[in-house]
Amino acid sequence: MNRLYHAPLSPFCRKVRLVLAEKKIEVELVEERYWEQSAEFMRRNPAGKVPILKIDSQTLNESQAICEYLEEVIPDPALLPRKPEDRAEVRRLVFWFDDKFHQEVTSKLLYERVNKKIMGQGYPESRNVKLGAQKIKYHIDYMGWLLDQRRWLAGDVMTLADFTAAAHLSCLDYIRDVDWNRNANVKDWYAKIKSRPAFRSILADQVPGFPQPSHYADLDF
């Protein structure tokens, strides 16, 4: 049985879960308290991070490496375009969200409000929360600008860039930190992507101590 070691509100784990579901690869989800750095966990990934995917007698680490492996071994449905320039744009946006968005928004909001409590690391730093709340506006505006010109974030078809962005935003939506009324294009895009069957398990996530907002699993908001 394939197995994914994950944390429910990790955007990197959610990205991998979306790709697995889109490609109809069944996996057993195993929640990992990665911050405890158990010896068994560190043997699976010496970097001490999730996600970790055990598949086909292999153990794979790092979300982007996992997603590109899955794209190569199961190319249909394709999540990376054929043309090199189109693939480059998808990868640019993947790194935009996994790097820039993660540093400026996800780490400032999700990690302060949720991860610190779960890990017993104290209270949120209000300065970081305020900064994240400011920065997310810029990113939503940028997404809206992209979607003014394209059907999906990287072009005319859905790609890994959309799943990566949705993974981050879905975590923040879980804690009510996305203003969906800021940009109609972004709201419509997210409604489309969260209506996909691949999103079902993510919309069913329940994190103890952090109840879902009423709109979170509503496909029509």
Image: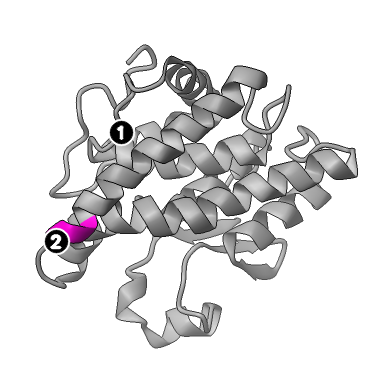
On the rendered structure, is 126 left or right of 18? left
Which residue lies at the image location 34% right of the left edge and 23% below the top edge?
Answer: 182
Q: In the image, residue 141 lies at what x, y percent?
A: 45, 30
Which residue lies at the image location 32% right of the left edge and 41% below the top edge?
Answer: 172
For marks 2 and 1, give the CA distance: 18 Å
The answer to whether residue 124 shows anywhere in this view is yes
Outermost residue toward the bottom in this view: 39
**The disc label shown at residue 124, or none:** 2
Question: Who is closer to the viewer here, 79 or 131?
Answer: 131
Q: Secondary structure at mark 1?
A: loop
Q: Is residue 99 above or below residue 215?
A: below
Q: Image quadrant of residue 60?
A: bottom right
On the rendered structure, is 116 left or right of 84? left
Q: Is residue 4 above or below residue 38?
A: above
The crowding category of the residue bearing disc 1, from other C-alpha atoms within 10 Å (few below 14, some 14 to 19, many at least 20), is: some
On the rendered structure, is 180 left or right of 184? left
Ranked by sequence position, the earlier of labels 2 and 1 is 2
Q: Image quadrant of residue 2?
A: bottom right
Magenta span: 124-128
Which residue lies at the image location 34% right of the left edge and 59% below the top edge?
Answer: 107
Mark 1, residue position: 178
The crowding category of the residue bearing disc 2, from other C-alpha atoms within 10 Å (few below 14, some 14 to 19, many at least 20), is: some
Q: Secondary structure at mark 2?
A: loop
